[in-house]
Image (tube, rainbow, N blue to C red):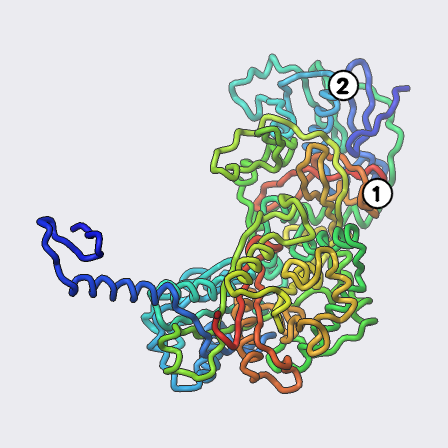
Amino acid sequence: MSETTEWKGYLLSHSNGSLLLQSPYIHDGTPVFGPDSDSTTMAVAGIQYLHAQGHKFTTIRLPQSIDAQVVYMSTSVDSPQRNQDLDDDVVDWHLIDGEEATLVLSQSDDEHYEFDEPIGTEIMDDELFTDMKAAWEQECSLQHVSQGAYVSQSQYYEGGAARLSLASQNFDGSIIWPPRQMDSSGVRLPKEDALLADAATVESWTKLSAAGAPSEFSLRAPILGGVQTVLVKFEEGPRGVFLVCDDVEYSPRIGDQVHFAVRRIYAQEGLIRYGLKAIPQSA
Amino acid sequence: MFVAGDGAFLDSTGGTLGFRAESNRLNQMLVLLRRVMVDVAVIGAGQTKYGNHHLGLKGMWAEAAENAFASVDQNFDPRQVDEAFIGSVAFGGGQLGNTAALLTEHSGMEGVAVRRVENACASSGFALRDAWMAIKSGQADIVVAGGIEKMNDLSPERKRFWLGVSGDTEWERLAGLTFPGTYALMARRHFHEHQSTHDDLVHISVKNHMHGFENQQAHLRKQVSFEKAAGGFMVADPLTLYDCCPTSDGASCVILAADHVVRQFTDDPVWIRSSGAGSDRLALHDRPSITQLVATQKASKSAYSAAGITARDVDLAEVHDCFTIAEMIATEDLGFADSGQGGLFARNGEGIRNQGSVCLNPSGGLKSKGHPLGATGTGQAVEVFKQLRGSVESERQVRDAEIGITHNVGGSGATCAVHVFGRDRNE
């Protein structure tokens, strides 16, 4: 029986050099995604896991269900789906999207794998599952448009690497994140060429009531009882604000350690905006 | 032309041009000097009541302007206005472009050089500063500064889109933050660093509701007990409903005049002794500290210095208390309390009218008087103008008030304007 590993909110199992990722949530006997997860966020987590294990690959074949641009901005792993110059036959790894909330990462393009059932699943509340599914379907529609503050697609992509992989600028001995344009003497700062460590300390936090949350969250915040945000300081110095991953029940304390995972933030006009969310160690 | 050693003007052949040319030059210099040294006074100020207004933009502005014109002691003709600056976020987007021209068109100032000034909640604080600078520069003698916002004619859903447009939308809004959340982060950190408590914020809420209760222009004219304010509905932990200002409709209008024309309008002007302003990084997480506002510190330091005063000289201050924590932090940044001692200041009742060391928010502040974003800065100036002239409701008059300030903040502190007003001009 293969061992189950918990990684960025997912369950991982190994078999013959392949990796199974599964959402920990179960509904009606089958795995389902959590409140802010989908196959793209799970694919990113899987690639990050393999990288952390020393598999330094740069190309992958992805199914159409996965946002290849988000995978690239999060991991620097490219795919023929995103980059037409890549040959589909010579990619390093293959990702197969399961029927339920499962993915397989493999170096072969086999369609069938055998894995033991992961340990550590939990039953998802029926009402939460139904309401969140309906909310996301409505939010992802083309007719769901902005009526005020608006982060355009191009603005979203411009900050994508910083938002999804903590890409930062290394300038004059300091690490800068999120990216800035000029220093105080008017000198243009370099492009992001460093990554912040995946660890930070909570310096403050709040939980906004559903009524106080930004309207981008108005369909889901009432289901979740509000949205929770932490202000954290990275070991390298920069600070940032992040939502809490999977909207888990969590009572933060100043000084808590967190790390980060890619999750859905919100959707508008048919485009899902992804970003990093904080995973508290005490959750 | 060369200047000879004795100061006489010589032409290129060495001949004297005479004293007429010198006299003309001196006159020009005197005119220039007078312009540089010109003092600016408020000769009239008025506003609408803040709250859920039945009027639209044009009607609200006309009412505020009408009240301002009527407050001028001598007859005032709006056609005398040289320039106008009107602050507004243009909330809801209904009249996002050319807002100001529409308003002056409907208030007797048709044809005046006018523009909308936008700096989030500090829009009209900066409109006031721009108006002051227009007179100081010598380019104008009579200038109107005002502000307006219509916030309560939107559906709740549309309103929530517009309530978060002034933070760093790309980073803060995508992290689930609107301003209640941003200020909640500041509050919790202040509690942690300075041992302040939510009870300290409750004292601020109770005080401002007490001050606003007597103000006929206030949005929320109701006193609130400590127990009720302490137990309010949680909006953004740790901030409750009683820590948050309301969303208000309203307009405010202030008329400024250069010193050499003031006496045509009043023998009882209120002088703008100085104007200070500053800015800071937009996103809270990009600042070295989230328990102080550098923009406020910079603006107040500059304003106090130019007016030749310190915080101890201030009798009353209209402080930007969009959330109670904002007033607590401003108490420190404006110099009324030492750094980290804003909680103690509130606990000791130091900001209560005619009781503490300085009256903070005699109008009720944003918490009780209301916060129609673009109108707030000049609305603060309306209050200080009336307080210094002794023309507010008698029960809420700050006794022996000689110097008042306004403190107007944009967003979570990205922009700030501070003005010092006095019964007397600068010495």
Q: Residues within 10 Å of mark 1 (few under 14, many from 20)?
A: some
Q: Residues within 10 Å of mark 2 (few under 14, many from 20)?
A: few
Q: Secondary structure at mark 1?
A: loop
Q: Chain of mark 1?
A: A
Is residue B277 visible in the rendered image? The answer is yes
Residue B266 occupies quadrant = bottom left
Q: Residue at x 49, y 76 (%)?
A: B270
Residue found at the very far right of the displayed protein: A1
Residue B282 at x, y percent in the picture: 58, 49
Residue A119 at x, y percent in the picture: 89, 29
Q: Amino acid at mark 1?
A: Met
Say if B427 sits above or below A11 in the image. Answer: below
Q: Is B202 in front, or is B14?
A: B14
Residue under pointer 2: A53
Is residue A223 visible in the rendered image? The answer is no
Q: Secondary structure at mark 2?
A: loop
Q: Chain of mark 2?
A: A
* Relative horizontal placement of residue A140, taking residue B345 as reference (left or right): left
Q: Amino acid at mark 2?
A: Gln
Q: Residue at x 79, y 32 (%)?
A: A10
Q: Is B20 in front, or is B163?
A: B20
